[in-house]
Amino acid sequence: MTSHVALPVDKAILLVEDDPDDAELTIRALRRVGIRGPIITARTAAKAMALLRHPPADLGHDGTLLSLVLLDLNLPGPGGLGVLDAIRSDPQAAQVPIVVVTGSTSPRDRERCDENGALGILEKPVDPGALLQLLGDANVTRAAA
């Protein structure tokens, strides 16, 4: 029997991914492992930061919009590291767990993500089992009934 993992249902996952095909694959992977909450997508760093600062009204707002950010490292503009740094320096969003998703295997990229407060880094395409393990190891998830 597949175990379902529930992130807080009143909070969304923000998927920051500029490639629509990668975004769709990631969403399907999340749904396949039982994550049913809202998933908001942003294709640019600017859009991601705008969503963090001004959450959609229909999601509600209790001081923390998101349960998780899945962040592509290789975004145009300031890139994933720029977004990571901006989130970490924003008092409202600083505590949100961030998992970096990348096609890069560069050890330096991994170091920089760690230095900037990422919970972890996963290679594309996202392996939902590896994501759940990472979240579970960090005690981000809670069992669903």
Image (spheres, helix red, strand yellow):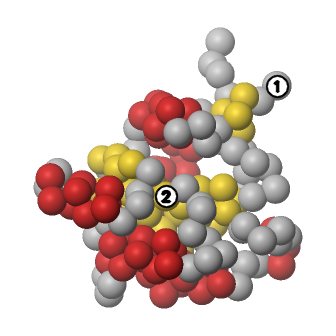
State whether residue 128 is above or below residue 81: above
Q: Residue at x 28, y 70 (%)?
A: 74
Say above or below: 93 vs 21: below
Quadrant (top left/top right/bottom left/bottom right) for the C terminus: top right
Q: Could you tell me which residue is drawn at 36 percent across and 66 percent down?
A: 116
Residue extending farthest top? 1
Q: Is 19 on the left-hand or right-hand side of 109? A: right
Query: Would residue 144 be found to the left or right of residue 23 on screen?
Result: right
Q: Residues within 10 Å of mark 2 (few under 14, many from 20)?
A: many
The spot of residue 17 in percent (x, y) is: 43, 67
Amino acid bearing label 1? Ala
Q: Residue 65: percent from the left, percent from the top?
A: 72, 68
Callout 1: SS: loop
| Vertical relation: 94 (above or below) 129 | below
Mark 2–mark 1 CB contact (< 8 Å): no
* Between 74 and 112, the one nearer to me in the picture: 112
**From this viewpoint, is residue 43 visible?**
no
Q: Is residue 28 left or right of residue 83?
A: right
Numbered tag placed on residue 19 in the rendering: none
Where in the figure is residue 110, as x and y percent of width and height?
24, 55
Residue at point 67% right, 63% down?
66
Mark 1: few/some/many CA within 10 Å (<14, 14-19, 20+): few
Q: Which residue is mark 2?
A: 98
Q: Of tags 2 and 1, which is closer to the observer?
A: 2
The Cα–Cα distance between marks 2 and 1, rounded to whole angstroms, is 25 Å
x and y percent of residue 77 in the render?
32, 87
Amino acid type of disc 2? Ile
Q: Residue at x 64, y 38 (%)?
A: 141
Q: In terms of depth relative to the viewer, which is nearer, 106 or 115?
A: 115
The secondary structure type at the circle numbered 2 is strand
| Residue assigned mark 1 | 145
Q: Earlier in the sequence, mark 2 or mark 1?
A: 2
